[in-house]
Amino acid sequence: MDRDTEMKRLRSTWLSAAAAGLLLMVPGGCVERTARVETDPPGALVIVNDEEVGVSPVKFSFLWYGDYDIMLRKPGYWTLKTHYRIEAPWYQWPPFDLVAETMIPATIRDEHVLPTFKLEPIGEATVAEIVQRATELRDQALYEEE
């Protein structure tokens, strides 16, 4: 191989390496996924997939699309256990997600607002109802083991 051919090959290799290095320096994109939970009345503790995320109204980040278990608690109200399915937008479907998360040099914000969850108040129990319930529990504890 002559000297000119070797120099051309070396220059081509160096340019390829420089181009690859420049591509690696281009910042990749990302997708910021958030969901917002609101309750009626506000101020309920929000637990998503057994993790406390805050007091309603609350906005939290999530990593994947799909079903989420949601539990809402507030003193004086019945605990609400439900689930909600967060659907992926079209740009998060394969192969579009590869472009959205790696090749777009900006942050894409995917915000979901869940429907407002209505909490039901716990009614005040009368003394007679409390005594009746206590009697039933006592009888259940004493006589069901026999």
Image: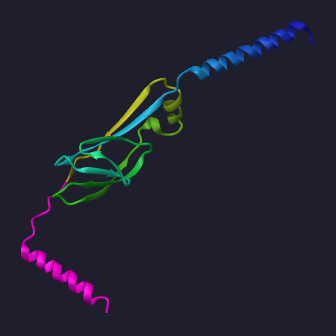
Q: Magenta part mainly helix, strand or loop? A: helix
Q: Which residues are magenta?
A: 119-146
Assign the C terminus to one quadrant of the image. bottom left
> Which residue is rendered at x = 49% and y = 28% of the image?
29
User: Is residue 124 found inside the magenta-colored segment of the image?
Assistant: yes
Looking at the image, residue 132 sits to the left or right of residue 106; the answer is left
Q: Residue furthest right?
A: 1
In terms of image quadrants, where is residue 22?
A: top right
Assign the N terminus to one quadrant of the image. top right
In terms of image quadrants, where is residue 140?
A: bottom left
Q: Residue furthest top?
A: 4
Q: Position of residue 132 (x, y in %)?
A: 13, 80
**Camera-nearest residue between 62 and 92:** 62
**Camera-nearest residue between 3 and 99:** 3
> Which residue is rendered at x = 21% and y = 54% of the image?
74
> Which residue is rendered at x = 15% and y = 58% of the image?
76
Task: Say above or below: 1 vs 31.
Answer: above
Q: How is the image coloured?
A: rainbow
> Which residue is rendered at x = 86% and y = 12% of the image?
6
User: Is residue 136 found inside the magenta-colored segment of the image?
Assistant: yes
Q: Position of residue 123 (x, y in %)?
A: 11, 64
**Camera-nearest residue between 124 and 66:** 124
Q: Position of residue 134 (x, y in %)?
A: 17, 79
Task: Say above or below: 31 vs 140.
Answer: above
Task: Please state the total of marks drawn on the protein image.
Answer: 0
Looking at the image, residue 9 sits to the left or right of residue 93; the answer is right
Looking at the image, residue 112 sits to the left or right of residue 129; the answer is right
Q: Position of residue 143 (x, y in %)?
A: 26, 90
